[in-house]
Image (cartoon, grey):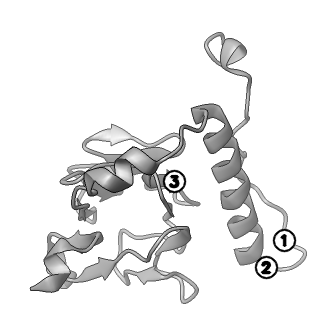
Amino acid sequence: MADLKKPSLAVLGGPMAGAKFLLPEPPASILVGSDLACHFRLELPGVSPTHAYIAVEDDGVTIDRGESPEGLHVNDNPVIGPTPLANGDIVWLGTPGEPDVVMLQCILPPRPASEVAETAFIAPEAVRVARHSAYRALRAQLRPPGEKNILREPHILPPSKALYR
């Protein structure tokens, strides 16, 4: 019963329905996929070896796409960069409506008011840049030695130029 109040991801359907992954205390980086190196391992047909990256920080939880051709969606919206997760969000490993898609529900209990008041403000752009660096480091660790990264890394542009891209 105590696990219901802990931050977690729950599998909503398929052969792994009901499986739950408890999110670790911040700061933490989590790999989601079918690979043996993944922290949250889902051996299902629609799940890529490194499908998603999750960052657990003091100010919240974000998810970013991994090296999956199937895609990643949060509440039917495609994930194209680090995306914040909220309590009740549905994470789709794949395209919603496809046969092998896996649905996860994000369970994030509200933080106590005392913790929220103590959280310092950090510029969102600085947080995004720091998380992007952490994701690149994780990707580099999983890539076999000598293999080139064939994926296009997201570009970090100043906010003023990002609108005109």
Q: Secondary structure under badge 2?
A: loop
Amino acid type of the residue tagged 1 in the rendering: Glu
Q: Residues within 10 Å of mark 1 (few under 14, many from 20)?
A: few
Quarter of the view holding residue 10: bottom left
Q: Residue at x 36, y 68 (%)?
A: 46
Q: Residues within 10 Å of mark 2 (few under 14, many from 20)?
A: few
Is residue 158 visible in this depiction of the protein? yes
Amino acid type of the residue tagged 2 in the rendering: Pro
Q: Which residue is mark 1?
A: 147
Location of the C terminus (image quadrant):
top right
Q: Residue at x 54, y 37 (%)?
A: 121
Vertical relation: 22 (above or below) 155: below
- Tell me: 55 left or right of 125: left
Q: Secondary structure under badge 1?
A: loop
Badge 1 vs badge 3, beta-carbon distance below 8 Å: no
Residue at the left extreme?
1
**Rendered location of residue 12, percent (x, y):** 15, 69
Q: Residue at x 69, y 12 (%)?
A: 160
| Dot label at residue 6 | none
**Rendered location of residue 85, percent (x, y):** 35, 50
Badge 1 vs badge 2, beta-carbon distance below 8 Å: yes
Q: Which one is in front, 1 or 17?
A: 1
Q: Which residue is mark 2?
A: 144
Location of the N terminus (image quadrant):
bottom left
Q: CA distance from mark 1 to mark 2?
A: 6 Å
- Tell me: 131 left or right of 75: right
Residue at the right extreme?
146
**Rendered location of residue 27, percent (x, y):** 55, 67
Q: CA distance from mark 2 to mark 3?
A: 19 Å
Q: Which residue is mark 3?
A: 65
